[in-house]
Image (cartoon, rainbow, N blue to C red):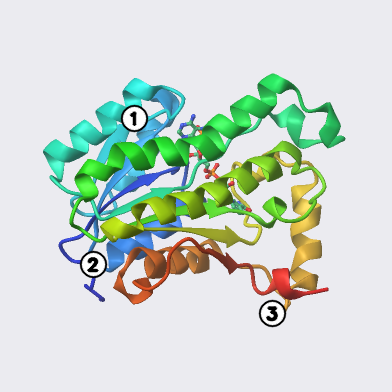
C-alpha cells in the first residue's frame, strides 16, 4: 500500500452512493493514507454515506448542503475541531432540475439556471473560502469535477454545461488567488460514468455507448480512473500543476 498521503487530511463533498465519482476518488486517496471526512446532503443520504465511510478507517461524516451557508460554515468549524488542518478539498457536487436537462437549452428558466449555478459552480468558491483558514501553510490542493459539456454542446446537458463553464473559469481565478499561498486548484473533466446524477441527463445511457466508440482508447473511463487522477491532483506528484482542467475521458476530447 502507498502511504505518500499519510498525515494528510481531506474533505470529500459529493458521495451519494458507491457509484459516485467522489467515492472512487475517496478510495484512491484513502488507500494512499489520507484521513478523510465525508459530507452528506440531508437525512435521506446520511445512512448510505455513513455505511460507505465505515469502510475507510478513521474517517468522519458530517452534513453539508451547499445551498445552506450555515452548514458550510459548521462543516469547516467541525473539521477544525476534528482534524485541525486540511490538505485536500474534493468538490464533486452538481445539481440541475431534471426538466432543465432535456429539450432545448433556451427553455431554461431563471430559477433553474440560478439553482444549477449555485450548487454546481458557486459552491466551489464558497467552500474554498471556508476551507482556507484550515489550509494555511499546508500547500494543499482543491479538486473539482467537470465535464466536456463546458466546452462543447452536449445534447441534454444544457444549463449544466453553462454551470461547468463557470466552474472551470472559477478554477482558474481561484488558482491565481491562492497560488501565492501554495494552494493549487484544478478540475478533472471526466468522461461519462453511470452515476445517480448522470442518470438525470436525458438519453445518457445511449450517449455513453456512443462515446465509447469515439474515444481514442475506444472505451469509456471507469470511476476508479477518475479516482486515481484525483489522487494525482491531490498529492505531491502534481505539485507543479494548478488552474488546469485535466481530461480523464479516454481521449474523447482530442477526437475530431
Ligand atoms: P452523484 O453520485 O449523484 O454525485 C453528485 C453529488 O452531488 C451527490 O452526492 C448529490 O447529492 C450532491 N449534491 C447535489 N446537490 C447538493 C447540495 N445542494 N449540497 C451538497 N451536495 C449536493 O454523481 P457523480 O456523477 O458522481 O457526480 C459528481 C460530480 O462529477 C458532479 O460534479 C458531476 O457533474 C461530475 N461529473 C460526472 C460525470 C458522470 O458521467 N457521472 C462526468 C463528468 C463530471 P444528492 O444525490 O442527494 O443530490
Residue highlighted by disc 1: 72
| Residue 214 place in picture, x, y as percent | 79, 72
Task: Give the residue displayed 72% in from the left and 79% down from the top.
Answer: 216
Dot 1 or dot 3: first in sequence order is: 1
Q: Quadrant of ligand 1?
A: top right
Residue 78: image quadrant is top left
As measured in the structure, the alpha-carbon distance from the residue carrying label 2 to the one carrying label 3 is 30 Å
Disc marking residue 5: 2
Above/below status of 54 relative to 215: above
Q: Residues within 10 Å of mark 3 (few under 14, many from 20)?
A: few
As measured in the structure, the alpha-carbon distance from the residue carrying label 2 to the one carrying label 1 is 25 Å
In the displayed structure, does residue 59 sit left or right of residue 152?
left
Q: Residues within 10 Å of mark 2 (few under 14, many from 20)?
A: many
Task: Give the residue displayed 20% in from the left and 39% down from the top.
Answer: 79
Q: Are marks 2 and 3 in contact (CB under 8 Å)?
A: no
Q: Nearer the viewer, residue 245 or 55?
A: 245
Disc marking residue 217: 3
| Residue 113 place in picture, x, y as percent | 68, 28
As measured in the structure, the alpha-carbon distance from the residue carrying label 1 to the one carrying label 3 is 39 Å
Within 8 Å of ligand 1, the CB of disc 2? no
Task: Give the residue displayed 55% in from the left and 38% down from the top.
Answer: 120
In the displayed structure, does residue 132 sit left or right of residue 200?
left
Q: Nearer the viewer, residue 224 or 6?
A: 6
| Residue 89 place in picture, x, y as percent | 35, 50
- Count of numbered circles in the view: 3
Q: Give the mark toward the camera: 1 or 3.
A: 1
The quarter of the rendered structure image containing the C terminus is: bottom right
Amino acid at each position: 500500500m502507498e502511504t505518500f498521503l499519510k498525515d494528510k487530511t481531506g474533505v470529500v463533498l459529493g458521495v451519494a452512493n458507491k457509484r459516485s465519482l467522489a467515492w472512487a476518488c475517496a478510495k484512491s486517496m484513502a488507500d494512499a493514507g489520507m484521513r478523510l471526512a465525508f459530507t452528506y446532503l440531508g437525512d435521506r443520504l446520511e445512512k448510505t454515506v455513513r455505511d460507505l465511510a465505515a469502510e475507510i478507517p478513521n474517517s468522519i461524516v458530517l452534513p453539508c448542503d451547499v445551498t445552506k451557508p450555515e452548514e458550510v460554515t459548521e462543516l469547516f468549524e467541525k473539521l477544525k475541531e476534528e482534524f485541525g488542518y486540511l490538505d485536500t478539498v474534493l468538490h464533486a457536487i452538481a445539481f440541475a432540475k431534471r426538466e432543465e436537462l432535456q429539450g432545448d437549452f433556451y427553455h431554461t428558466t431563471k430559477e433553474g439556471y440560478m439553482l444549477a449555478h449555485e450548487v454546481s459552480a458557486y459552491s466551489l468558491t464558497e467552500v474554498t473560502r471556508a476551507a482556507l483558514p484550515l489550509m494555511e501553510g499546508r500547500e494543499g490542493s482543491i479538486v473539482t469535477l467537470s465535464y466536456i459539456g463546458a466546452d462543447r454542446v452536449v445534447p441534454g446537458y444544457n444549463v449544466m454545461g453553462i454551470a461547468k463553464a463557470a466552474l472551470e473559469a472559477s478554477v482558474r481565478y481561484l488558482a491565481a488567488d491562492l497560488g501565492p499561498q501554495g494552494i493549487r486548484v484544478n478540475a478533472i473533466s471526466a468522461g461519462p460514468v453511470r452515476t445517480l446524477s448522470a442518470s438525470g441527463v436525458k438519453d445518457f445511457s445511449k450517449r455513453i455507448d456512443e462515446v465509447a466508440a469515439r474515444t481514442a482508447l475506444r472505451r469509456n473511463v471507469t470511476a476508479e480512473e477518475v479516482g486515481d487522477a484525483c489522487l494525482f491532483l491531490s498529492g505531491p506528484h502534481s505539485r507543479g500543476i494548478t488552474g488546469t482542467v485535466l481530461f480523464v475521458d479516454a481521449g474523447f476530447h482530442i477526437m475530431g
